[in-house]
Amino acid sequence: MTALLASLPLIPFGAALVGLLLRGRRLPAALAVVSAAATLVVALSLLSLERLERTAVVADFVDIEVTAGVRATTATVWVAVTVAVVALAVQLYSVAYLHDDERYAPYAAQVSLFTAAMLLVVVSADLVQLLVGWEVMGICSYLLIGHDRRLPEAPRAAVKAFLVTRVGDVGFLLGIALLGVRVGSFRIDTVLAADLPAGTRLTVCLLLLAGVAGKSAQFPLHTWLPDAMAGPTPISALIHAATMVAAGVYVVAVLYPLFAATPVALTVLGIMAVVTMLLGALAATAQADMKRVLAWSTVSQLGYMTGALAVGVPSAALFHLLTHAAFKALLFLAAGAVIHAIGSNLIADAGGLRRSMPVTFVVTTIGLAALVGVPPFAGFWSKEAVLAAALHEGSGIAWVVYGVGVVTVAVTGWYATRLWLGLFFGPPRASSPHEPPALMRGPVVVLAVPAALLGFVALAPDFSARLGALSTTGPSPELGHLDAAVLVPLLASAFGVALAWLMWRRDPAADPAARLPGRGSFASAFYLDAVQDALVTRPVLAVSAAVLRADESGVGGAVRGIGRGSRGAGGRLALLHRAPMPRAATAALAGALVLGVGAVVLRAVL
Amino acid sequence: MTTADLLLVALGAVAVGAGVLVVSTRHIVRAGLWLVVNLLAVAGCYLVLAAELVAWVQVLLYVGAVVVLLLFAVMLTRAPIGASDDLDRPRWPGALIGGGAGLGLAALFVSGYRWSRVDLPSPGTATALGEQIFTAWVLPFEVVGVLLLAALIGAIVVSRPDIGSR
Amino acid sequence: MPVWVELVLRVLAVVAAFLTLPLLIGQTEHKVMAHMQGRLGPMYAGAFHGWAQLIADGVKFVQKEDVTPREADRPVFRLAPVVALLPYLVVLLVIPLGPSGLVAQPLDIGLFFVLSVVGVGVVSVLMAAWASANKYALLGGLRAAAQLLGYELPFVLAAASVAMAAGTLSLPGIVEAWRPWWLLWQFPAMVIFFVAGLAEIRRPPFDMPIADSELVFGYMTEYTGLRFAFFVLAEYVGILVIGALTTVLFLGGWKGPFGLDAELGWLWTLIKVAAVSFVIIWFRVAYPRLREDQLQRLCWLVLVPLALAQLVLTVAVKVAL
Amino acid sequence: MHPVIPYVIAAALVGLGAYGVLVRRNAILLLMAVELILGGVNLVLVTADATVRAVLPAGGQVFALFVIVLAAAEIGVALALVLQLYRLRRAVAVDEIPLEREP
């Protein structure tokens, strides 16, 4: 079992190492797909796992010990299965999607590495080990977002993603370091069992939340995610569905006992969640680019997950993580098919694709239905679980989460409908669109199955308990339980869908978003990028310029001055030293004699 | 005064006398020859002090090799036969320091040992010394070997300009 | 017998050997060389086959004028022949003639003593060469110094090999430990020791320092009379010493074939020394003189590596036993 | 045996050597004076070996042997330098070596 668990990250890691050495297409493609499939098989074989924790001490510094090992529960395996499924789908899809890209081989290897890093985060039993996977994901996202160098925005977006997540990672690193130093170990079980003073715990939690906000694109560090659309579409699916953004939520779920004991941190998380949720949804309403719509919707859905964490139900968050991974991967891959067909990212360039791309139409419909929360699709169950959890919790922040969650459901319905209508209805605009090749179609269709049906697992008798066992030992609320409160979000989403439909009906050729009040601020996501630019980027650049100047003239000048001064002084001293050998020898021996006499005299005197 | 004392005094007188001549003679080659006398006398002191092996090593290495090398160098640098007048520079600093060092050390030794007496150890056999060198001192011994090798290579490189400049 | 009487007897015996044996070797050289060259050699002095030729030579040398060049460094010039002779005389003190203490002065580290004292001989050559104020003498002296310094290395190494084999530095001890099969085991060492020994005493074919066709007579150019005779005598004593050392170290010293070592040991030693001395004389007739560069090449490229290899072999066999 | 005798001889040799090092102009003579100092040091070591009963027997003699070997190495290198100097300048007087220029 331990070996199987350990092989989860190791298989794709090995594939990545080998793949980085390969050239061409066939071999890397085969390697990538086979390794992803092997990972999936291993993950599936682990499904019976109840709980496992096996660590070995790597280094013991007396005060602090670093371990390596694996830690897993059933929930871990589910997340791993999800990652593996999405990774396999992405690898298969990429073979066709990047069929004329000459840098396919490193791309495939990087995707494998990305997968390996995410799986490492998932199965780590040690925080340092987890951090390694966490950071490798950062570098992989940088590489993959910037894959297409010809696009003007790709390198910029890659750098942005890297820097913004890095800001959070600093907090994460500090949090882990503080935790490890205080507890004396980085082993997760030890850390969770430790009894920490409240102040330390709060500090640690807030620092960790910074990292989570960076990776999981929570307000205010969410700005990199929409820009990351510059990467190839399969990468978007990978980042948004299963890996990067899920990592933050997953880590909070794993370390949940720590947060559960720190209400202030949970409140902060809740505020972050509601802002992210609503902001993402509103921003999604006005995007012209279909991938950006999906990206903002990811931001919004991540808000649900963190909201669930904030109200104290990590099992609901993980459930939403799983379903969201399914339908969001599906949506991105389907969007990729559309882009592939019409050669443009813009909704305005699509339309009426219902007839020419029936398969894509059906799966996208399933995916959007799941996103909106139409019963019985997957998203309905998980979102319902989140909202029900917030309702049952009943504290102040839970009410806010619930309220904003319901509003967001309506907004979600609106933008999903707008996207659906914009893509598949109305007048056709593209010339002769066609279904994508089978290799792209296959993964999409396969992903449609969980997107549609995954929600029903919530009805399984011990599902909630097993999902909750990842982080809490106490009983977890029943996730598949439905009551009358379910009508509120259903009505809200129906309202959103109906509103969008009505607005579209008036002029099917026009974009409903054009008539939206506050459209400009929605489209630019409330100008947060500009705010960030003005508040952070520019001051930092100014300060760094000032520092550079100070360094060059002040510090450098001082160093150079000292250097010049000591050279001069040294030269003068060297002149003194450059005595002829006899004089030098006389001086040295006389010195020795004086010292010897001095020593004897001193001893006699003292 | 025992026999050993008498022998030491006699050999010491020879050694010191030869030493004086080494540093004061105006014939360069004779300085080397006086050095031979000095070294042989010191070797004699070693014999009296029951350090046979050291004595013979001194004869083999110093008289047989070092002094020969010195004389060789003297001859290669075209030292004149007969007295030279420019061998010394002003003597008083040297005399002051050398005399100071010699007298100071002598005073230290005298004050330390007075006229105390020790019995000489039985003549040390080479076996005992060899055992010591190859057990307790084997590492320094190896290091000395490496140092000798380095010195050998260094001497070759320095004295052959055709190797160094390449 | 009081200790001092015994001591005096021993020293007297050594002095006697020192005075007679070299003369014997010299006479042998005259006659052997002559016969090898197809002539008779000295025939008149002393009536029977010119046996007293060397005595006559000695008388002649004494009669000659003792010349010292004007530019020479007189004291050094005069001292050099004595210094040349002295080390060999001292070496004879420790050569064992027979078993059970038939040696002038048994020394615990006799071999080391011999090696170090033989090394002092170089100084005399340098003294003679430099004090003569003659360029041939100086050139010869430099050659001699280079040669002696160089050949000292294989000389010592070969001796070290046999000392390691015997596990002692004492000359009687080495003879005690010697076994006939060592002739095979230590054969390379013996050859090296013998050749390097020839070079040490500057015998042909290693007589570049006094190469008469190039350097007149090398460092001995300016010497006449008794002082010259001393140098010649030193050469013959050198033959004796090298022969005796080769005998003691490599040929088993007093050990003979008939099990009468205790009684006839001294005779075996003398016979072996005579045989080796004969070979040395033979070499002079048989081989032409080496050139200076050939000489150094032989030393550094043949003898030293061979000697080191012999050391390895000795250690290997010693450890294996 | 009175150890003070060899010790005083050694002190005298060291003093003479120091004097020689300082007074002699010829590099080779200077080296000879250095040998005097080393001889004095060795005499101290050997005398101490005979006088003091050390933990390791014969330590002083071993040290003396090392010093002799080091002296041999030193003289080899030093003479190579002296001969090179002679080749360059036709002189071996140490106070004629110019040191004023940067190397």
Image (cartoon, rainbow, N blue to C red):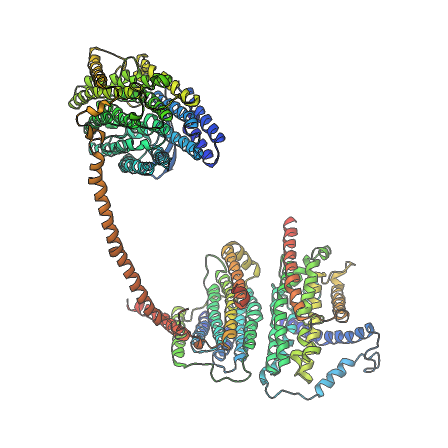
Which residue is at the front of the view, C132 or D84?
A: D84
Which residue is at the front of the view, A202 or A520?
A: A520
Place of residue B47 in the rendered image (x, y in percent of width and height, measured from the top left) = 54, 68
Place of residue A71 in the rendered image (x, y in percent of width and height, measured from the top left) = 36, 26
The quarter holding residue A343 reads: top left
Badge count: 0
The answer to whether A48 is drawn above or below residue C15 in the figure is above
Residue C103 is at least partly visible in this image: no
The answer to whether D23 is drawn above or below residue A519 in the figure is below
Place of residue C37 in the rendered image (x, y in percent of width and height, measured from the top left) = 82, 74
Place of residue A43 in the rendered image (x, y in percent of width and height, measured from the top left) = 41, 22
Residue D46 is at least partly visible in this image: yes
Q: Is residue D65 left or right of residue C288?
A: left
Which residue is at the front of the view, B79 or C223?
A: B79
Name the image quarter holding the C terminus of chain D: bottom left
Q: Is residue C158 left or right of residue B48?
A: right
Q: Residue furthest left?
A: A396
The quarter holding residue A301 reads: top left
The answer to whether D16 is drawn above or below residue B118 in the figure is below
The quarter holding residue C119 reads: bottom right
Q: Is residue C21 left or right of residue C157?
A: right
